Amino acid sequence: MARFDGFECMERKLVVGNWKMNGDLVSNQALFEQLVDRSPSSIDTALCVPFPYLAQGQRALSGSAIMLGAQNLSEFDAGAYTGEVSGRMLSDFDCRFVIVGHSERRTVFREDDQLVARKARAALAAGLVPIVCVGESLAERDAGQAEDVLLRQLEALVQLLDGASLARLVIAYEPVWAIGTGRAASPEQVQEILSFVRRWLSGHVGNSRAIRILYGGSVKADSAAALFSLPDSDGGLIGGASLVAQQFLEICEAAAKAAQDGNMGDFKGSR
């Protein structure tokens, strides 16, 4: 089994909880205690918590199989950038992952493709694994521009990162149009995009299967099994459900089962 940056990949699914701007010291501690030593050992699990709670997460997850992550970082390493947090600072708290270019960062905070690429480069320089989010809006999906948008976002990465650096990324597909719009992404639609990303990666790295591609569109316990069984799905980036221990653990169990089943569902041959 292959290994990458200290954890196993390809055969192992990765499930990442994104707490977004939620939590407090008391509820966080309860959630940590409900999750530690309960996630399946056959998958990799991480929690990306708000900056103020990184120290709490570091203590709570120390010695456990659950890895710690952050939700954002600065493109800069240090200096007069009031309010920013560098990759080196995140490393001080034993962070392994950092989310880069989440759809909310792109839409609410106007982060463009070039800034996302610079942040991914900064994360790699600090020894972190960037989870680079890509995805199209409802208007872009309806206009038939999904692949064009994904291509633009992905191509921005190769302007700054060589093949060896690209091979150290995790890619998360977030269909912005399926988050809070009442429109759900079907497994077929998800697999179509995951396969597109995999094909793009194959043109830039030696082994595209060594790069994990996650799905991040309102994954719930009842939809996780179908999504994780897709041939090009290597796990999920989980939002609201990661704040409820039982739901998050059920999603992790679905990932473990999909890995055990070998991703041999109805979708064949895209890898």
Image (tube, helix red, strand yellow):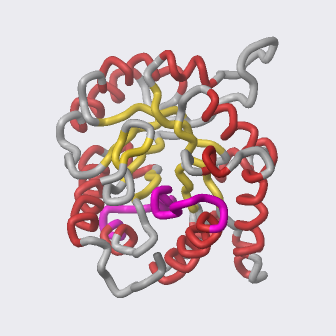
Residue 212 percent across, percent down from the top left: 47, 56
Residue appearing at x 61%, y 64% in the figure: 201
Residue 2 relative to residue 129: left or right: left
Q: Which quadrant of the figure has residue 229?
A: bottom left
Residue 270 relative to residue 156: left or right: left
Residue 69 percent across, percent down from the top left: 47, 33
| Residue 219 on the magenta span | yes
Q: Residue furthest front?
A: 206
Residue 104 percent across, percent down from the top left: 66, 49
Residue appearing at x 52%, y 32% in the figure: 70
- Which residue is nearer to you in this view: 133 or 208? 208
Count of labels shown?
0
- Which residue is nearer to you in this view: 114 or 222? 114
Residue appearing at x 30%, y 79% in the figure: 264
Residue appearing at x 34%, y 47% in the figure: 8
Q: Is residue 114 above or below residue 64?
A: below
Q: Which residues are magenta?
A: 203-224
Q: Is residue 264 above or below residue 206?
A: below
Residue 49 percent across, percent down from the top left: 47, 32
- Which residue is nearer to you in this view: 93 or 7? 7
One can see residue 180 in this view: no
Q: Is residue 188 above or below residue 233?
A: below
Residue 251 relative to residue 118: left or right: left
Quadrant of the rendering where the N terminus is positioned: bottom left
One can see residue 60 in this view: yes
Q: Residue furthest top?
A: 80
| Residue 218 on the magenta span | yes
